Each structure stands twice: as structure tokens, then as C-alpha cells.
Image (spheres, rainbow, N blue to C red):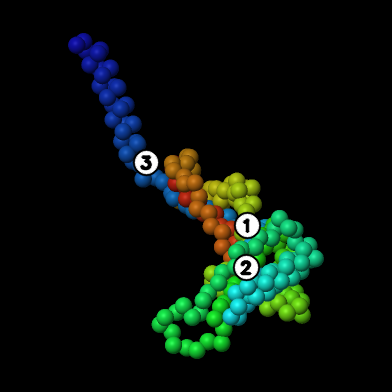
Amino acid sequence: MSNKSVALAIIILGFLLKAGIDNFASKDNIVTVKGLAEREVEADKVTWPIPTKELGNDLPELYQRINVTTNKVKTFLKQNGIKDSEISVNAPVVIDLNADQYSTNIRQFRYNITSIITVTSKNVKLVRSIMSRQGELLKQGVAVVDGGYQNPTTYEYVSFQQLKPKMMEEAIENAQSTAKQFAKNSKSKLKGIRRADQGQFSIEDRDGNTPYIKKIRVVTTITYSLKD
């Protein structure tokens, strides 16, 4: 190998070694930050189960009574603006109270029959206004029982996908702002993004008293390279 070739090889090797050293030196010059975006929105879908119950000893009579009750509830809902397409009626559930072989209690009635009418609507404000007027059903002899944990009223925000891109953009901007401030404080500059996640999204009730108000939260984690 000629002297010129050896010299050229040494120069190239020097550049490669320098690049490797520079890369190693800047390997840890990074900052990882989180960006947050939050919104409070009103739910745009409600599911409202309306359970009614009848007790008695004569099943045919009970079915007749529960059908009358169901028709009264449906009429009440439709008179207040609920559409037929938003109403569904589940088959009645019958419990034979005498079938419990471990119970020695003497019961006045043998059968407990429950029917659930479910309203599913995107008109949340209308449904909530009807809920506050359930007392009108009492005047008709209809007692709506508590749905309990098995049949709770639920609120959803189904338009989240439309809001998602804007909130993601806001979270990224907030992360970048934090990273820039860090770079300024450390007397360096941002070079570019090393890593970024897709963001963590959550939708929760704002609090226990207003389940129809949802808090949407987006958190993204981004790692930036820094240069002096």
C-alpha cells in the first residue's frame, strides 16, 4: 500500500473515530417531557334504565299489571319527546320467592316480577329534564324503583374521535413548550424528536354529582435531542 493510501486511510479513520466520539458524547443529551391537554364536555349520549316491579301470587294477573305499567311509562316518555326508536323494553324477569329452599321466612307474595324500559338517546338535556319529573308517574300509580348498581344510568361522550386530533396537537405543543424552557435553562437548543408515544387518553366523570359532565385528558410523552 502506498504512503498516500495509508495517509488517506488514517484520515478517514480519524473522521470515523471523531464522529463516533461525538455521537457518544451527545448520546445522553436528551430531555423527556410530558404534554397535557384537558377538556370538560357535556355527555352526548345517555342510557336510562327505568325498572318497575310488581308483587303478587297470580302470574297471569301480574303480567297484565306489568304490561299496563309498561304502557303508562312508554306513554309518559313519548308525551315528553322521547322517540319510539329510543325506547326498548326488556322481557319481564320473574322471581319465585318460594323457590329459595334455604329461607324459612313467611312471605306475603310468592312472585316478584320486574320489567325494565331503557331509554337510549343523544338528547341528554331532554332525558335529564324528564328524569326530574318522574313524580308524574306516581300520580298514575307507577312506582319506578332504583336501578341500583345493576341498572345504573350512564352517560357517554361518543364524539371523542372528532376532538382527539385537536387535543393531541395541543398536548404536543405543551410538551414542546416545556422542552424549550428546559433547553433555555440549560443553555442548549432542541434538535428534534427522538421518541414520542401515541398519547394516553382518558374520559372520566368530572365528579360524582355531575356524571353528565366528562373530563377528557390526553397525556403524551416526547423525548427531544439537545445541542449545546
Mark 3 Cα-neighbour bin, 10 Å: few <14, some 14–19, many ≥20 = some
Residue under numbered circle 1: 157
Q: Is residue 196 above or below residue 35?
A: above
Outermost right residue: 79
Q: CA distance from mark 1 to mark 3?
A: 45 Å
The answer to whether residue 60 is left or right of residue 16 is: right
Instruction: Give the image location of residue 121, x and y in percent.
Output: 69, 59
Residue under numbered circle 2: 116
Quadrant containing the C terminus is top left
Which comes sooner in the sequence, label 1 or label 3?
Answer: 3
> What label does residue 51 carry, if any?
none
Amino acid marked by disc 2: Ile
Q: Nearer the viewer, residue 100 or 39?
A: 100
| Tag in front: 1 or 3 | 1
| Tag in front: 2 or 3 | 2
> What label does residue 26 carry, if any?
3
Q: Find out whether the residues at labels 1 and 3 contact each other: C-beta distance under 8 Å.
A: no
* Element type at mark 2: strand
- The residue at 57%/83% (across/down) is 109
- Picture quadrant where residue 111 is located: bottom right
Q: Find out whether the residues at labels 2 and 1 contact each other: C-beta distance under 8 Å.
A: no
The answer to whether residue 10 is left or right of residue 168 is: left
Q: Nearer the viewer, residue 134 or 196?
A: 134
Instruction: Give the image location of residue 186, x and y in percent.
Output: 45, 51
- Picture quadrant where residue 60 is located: bottom right
Q: CA distance from mark 2 to mark 3?
A: 66 Å
Please indicate, yes or no, whether residue 169 appears anywhere in the rendered image.
yes
Quadrant containing the N terminus is top left
- The residue at 39%/45% (across/down) is 29
Q: Nearer the viewer, residue 186 or 29?
A: 29
